[in-house]
Amino acid sequence: MGQTVATSAFVSRCLMSSIRPLIPLLITAGILLGGNGLQSTLIALRGAQEGFSASTIGLMGTAYFMGFLLGCIFITRIMKAVGHVRAFAALAAIAASATLTLVLVIDPVMWSVIRFATGFCFAGLFTVMESWLNSGVSNHDRARILAIYRIIDIASVTGAQFMIPVFGAGGFTIFAIMSIMITLSLVPVSLGDRSNPTPPEDVKLDLKRAWQISPLGSIGCIFVGVTNSAFRTLSPIYAEQIGLSVTDVVTFVSVGIIGGALVQYPLGYMSDLWDRRKVLLVTTMGAMASALMLVFLAGDSPLANFVFVFIFGSFAMPLYSLSAAHANDRAEKGEFVLINAALMLFYSVGAIAGPFVASVVMERYGPHALFSFSAAVYVVFVGVIIYRMGSRSPVPAGHRGRFIALLRTSPIFARLAGRNSASSGTDDG
């Protein structure tokens, strides 16, 4: 018994010693994830207070995802030119300055330009950070780091939301806090690690190959990009327009995110056991049904909206990872990074279109039309899934990889997750 305890303690010390050098990067991740999530909600609320229309705020969301897409494509060139630390410092400085400019210049055109710039910067910041993590973590610790990273993501994104009711959406204070958060992310990066790893190779974007491997996975990522970006950009507007308080607005957004985080792994586990397309079909139908509940049953009741958005998030948020997992089941060994980089691009294309189209629908038909729009997209996706199930046989159980919950922070996340799934037939390329 004593020997077992001693062995466990030794293993724990070894794990902590290997993970300890990555703690500064994980702290940086928490700050950036929280600041990015806070900014998305605050832009919508403050824009509404300033009299911006729903379509104007939707256009800002579109601008953000356009910048994010370009950031994902070009950041590796910047890293190769100046290295990790300088690239991170430059992008953080721009993002912090842009955040302060939001409150200094209250103008929808300027805000759209700033959102484009911050989208580019955050894509670059996440890529630098995740590239650094990927180079520093051993294969043995990869699963543990991914779990910690996911916990940090949920805790920081949801926790940061509640700074809004504490400090208010109006005035200068909350923007100064966001700028401080982005600036502070420089501290652990600058002081916590003296290494400067080799920049990653350019992400290969073979969209044709990805589509050939899995039309369903590619289409799924586009549709999920449309609906999830619309929800993330416009759900604060929906909640504000139906009369919820500021605290209830951020609770509404947070409950949807938490629902997706909690239910994603049970759905992923089921998709490992059964035909993944069946789980994808049921999950899409659940997202559609819960969106319609928000349209027809939630009304303006805070409690009803919290319950239904939790259900909506539980089904809507895992759809990206389920679509990606299905695509990876079809991929050849060594194509994990290639396929996931392409899927993220497909997601970004959908995310560019989603906020603006949904906002135009909301402006014409009212706040509940946000979820009517989402339900309509899910109806089309259900039809696509059923069609693909009839035209192609399922992936044999022995060829299905293990489900991995993928974050859409940067293409490098696929490399961070890739080696973790090597034992299940995929590769990091």
Image (cartoon, rainbow, N blue to C red):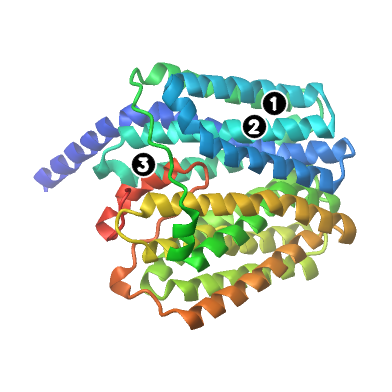
Front position in the image: 221 or 254: 221
Q: Which mark is residue 326?
A: none
Q: Residue at x 57, y 33 (%)?
A: 122
Query: Mark 2 near mark 1, Cβ–Cβ under 8 Å?
Result: yes
Farthest residue toward the front?
A: 208
Which structural element holds mark 1? helix
Give the mark nearest the N terminus, 2 or 1.
Answer: 1
Using the numbered discs, state the Cα–Cα distance from disc 3 to disc 1 in whole angstroms.
Answer: 30 Å
Q: Name which residue type carries label 2.
A: Thr
Q: Quadrant of residue 225?
A: bottom right
Q: Quadrant of residue 14?
A: top left
Which structural element holds mark 2? helix
Q: Is residue 5 left or right of residue 90?
A: left
Using the numbered discs, state the Cα–Cα distance from disc 2 to disc 1 in whole angstroms.
Answer: 8 Å
Query: What residue is disc 2 on?
Result: 118
Q: Nearer the viewer, mark 3 or mark 1?
A: 1
Specify whether residue 248 is in view.
no
Q: Is residue 152 left or right of residue 164?
A: left
Query: What residue is disc 1 on?
Result: 99
Q: Nearer the viewer, mark 2 or mark 1?
A: 2
Q: Residue at x 35, y 37 (%)?
A: 134
Query: Mark 3 near mark 1, Cβ–Cβ under 8 Å?
Result: no
Query: What residue is disc 3 on?
Result: 145
Q: Is residue 30 left or right of residue 136?
A: right
Where in the figure is residue 386, as x and y percent of width and height?
A: 55, 79
Q: Residues within 10 Å of mark 3 (few under 14, many from 20)?
A: many
Where in the figure is residue 332, as x and y percent of width and height?
A: 32, 61
Q: Name which residue type carries label 1.
A: Thr
Using the numbered discs, state the Cα–Cα distance from disc 2 to disc 3 in whole angstroms.
Answer: 27 Å
Give the mark nearest the N terminus, 3 or 1.
Answer: 1
Q: Is residue 258 left or right of residue 249?
A: left
Where in the figure is residue 142, as x and y percent of width and height?
A: 31, 44
